[in-house]
Amino acid sequence: MSDTSIKPRIEKVPLSEQFFQKLPVLLVPMLALGGLVAIGSPDSWLTLTVAGLAMGMMIFIMASGLTVVFGLMDVINFGHGAFVAVGAFVGFTVLAWLAGWTTSPSVMLNLFAVLIAILAAMLVTGLLGYAFERVIVMPVYGEHLKQILVTMGGLIVAQQMIYVVWGPDELHLSRPEALKGSFVIGEAAIEKYRLVAVGIGLALFLAMRHILKSTKVGLLVRAGVENGEMVEALGYRIRRLFLIVFMTGSALAGLGGVMWGLYQETITAHMGSEIMVLVFIVVIIGGLGSVEGCFIGALLVGLLANYTAFLAPKVALISTIALMVAILMWRPQGLYPVVKAK
Amino acid sequence: MMTDTLLSLSGVHTHIGPYHILQGVDLDVPKGGVTVLLGRNGAGKTTTLRTIMGLWKASQGDVRFGDHVISRLDTPEISRRGIAFVPEDMGIFTDLTVAENMLLAAANGPMDQKRLAWIKDLFPPIGTFWNSSAGTLSGGQKQMLAVARAIIEPRRLILIDEPTKGLAPAIINSMTDALRELKNTDTTILLVEQNFTMASSVGDTVAVMDDGRIIHAGSMKELAEDADLQEQLMGLSLEAHQ
């Protein structure tokens, strides 16, 4: 090396800047604390907080796939709601077949029934995602307007297919016996199913984080989100990665569909397009392509929706939109903006 | 030295949207050593590298690497044939650590530790900031990482696009030394460079581009010694670049 080589050094990030970077993580406890002050009653607050976290986790499950698909593939998939709805209907069918298990007093049989329903929904929506990517998305890579049009078309076709297979009526999706009812702590009633939803959402987030941070596939996804062209120049076939991510995102939407269906206990062919409003808000709040941002955004939306529904039901209608506007005014690229190569 | 042709472009045309950028490029890159591609801004140098790499497809003509035509292959396949690319913007994954950037660059398996040690010796910041986020590196350190990534696995050809652009003189010297050391390996380098002093100090052969065509090809030594030819080809004498 040359004698003139410069001593390596790295710029230190000022403390204030470090705090600013970490601030999005603190938003969730800050909102929860604000909720406690506004609600007053700790019991009501606990019930609403668990409900908000459960709702947030389910939205995160549905939104996580969409945000990674957008970040990696630059695809705006308005058809994502189709996977939510199809997942819910497949889950309904499986749980109907396993009615003997879901009505059994055995907790294990109840949970097995839900697990099989979830796996079946994920399998079907994953395969549907494969077909969707090959037939609908692949011809319009890089063309956003066409993506919006064809993926919305795909959503409509999927909804009509649900009518054909399951009929046009709203269906009742009953929770297994073990997931019915609530735990009562003091005067707070915490639904069992909401705790399960929080557990599954948290486990999924930690698993996704682990995969993205600690595996080579995860590294490729993160690198591909930033600069897909360079990933190809290093010898990796990013189209194959696109497909895997799209199928995974679709399967997660299917999982979210089953969970949302069990949460609402009714399912319709339009449930996917209805929930997509919240899902898109969460993806935008989090920063397009950011799983961490999506997670925090989902929790914020879930908590705020429940708190405002309790405190001021009329405000609840616009609370999530107001939250999105406030966050975008503070951080126009979302909570965790993903840097993309130009 | 440098008798066989490793890479050859014959009559290569490249269109980007409505623009006809490369207009029949004929270029031979001899095996071993450094071939420098010179030319004013917009002459088509970057487009030539990107066309070789398959990032932009040649609309006409052939790119031949060794005995095979590669212009119809996709980028990952071209990379796997032994061509590495260091783009002008360096292509660093800033969300990943230095170690993760290197890990991804070793596409064919685990990193060879002996080779990694050699790279850390060649570019000390790679070792120093191994676990740091690549986004926090300075411009020069990022450029070192970009080149380090390209050589973490043995490559037959490395395409490097303006590695000294915007760098401090001391870093340019380090980069020049590193390229000289790379020349001692079996690696062939096709270097796009605006800094004529640096280019002439490492280059063995040279090609000058203008308006999407090669207008001169020959020995770098001859061009460096011929101020009139420099003036004629690039409108600037070597002295003006020093």
Image (cartoon, helix red, strand yellow):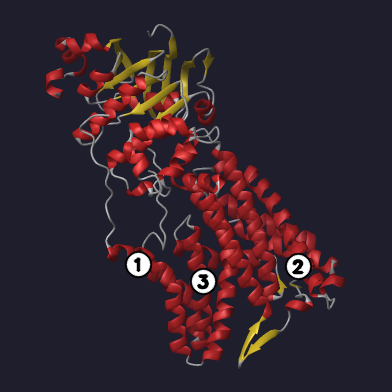
- Element on which disc 2 rests: helix
How crowded pointer 1 is (Cα within 10 Å; few <14, some 14-19, many 20+) is rated as: few
Quadrant holding the N terminus of chain A: top left
3 vs 1, front mark: 3
- Element on which disc 1 rests: helix
- Residue A71 in picture, x, y percent from top left: 49, 51
- For residue B173, which quarter of the picture? top left
* Chain identity of mark 3: A
Q: Is residue A139 left or right of residue B219?
A: right
Q: Of A278 and A197, which appears nearest the observer?
A: A197
2 vs 1, front mark: 2
Q: Is residue A277 left or right of residue B20?
A: right
Residue located beneath label 3 in the image:
A299
* Chain identity of mark 1: A
- Label 3 to label 2: alpha-carbon separation: 24 Å
The single residue placed furthest to the top in the displayed view is B3
Q: Is residue A188 left or right of residue A282?
A: right
Amino acid type at image mark 2: Val
Q: Earlier in the sequence, mark 3 or mark 2?
A: 2
* Chain identity of mark 2: A
Task: Inspect this view and state whether residue B238 appears.
Answer: yes
- For residue A111, which quarter of the picture? bottom right
Relative height, residue A208 to residue A243 (above, below): below
Residue located beneath label 2 in the image:
A114
Amino acid type at image mark 3: Leu
- Label 3 to label 1: alpha-carbon separation: 19 Å
Amino acid type at image mark 1: Met
Residue occupying the point 43% across, 48% down? B96
**Dots 3 and 2: beta carbons under 8 Å?**
no
- Residue A58 in picture, x, y percent from top left: 60, 68
Residue located beneath label 1 in the image:
A329
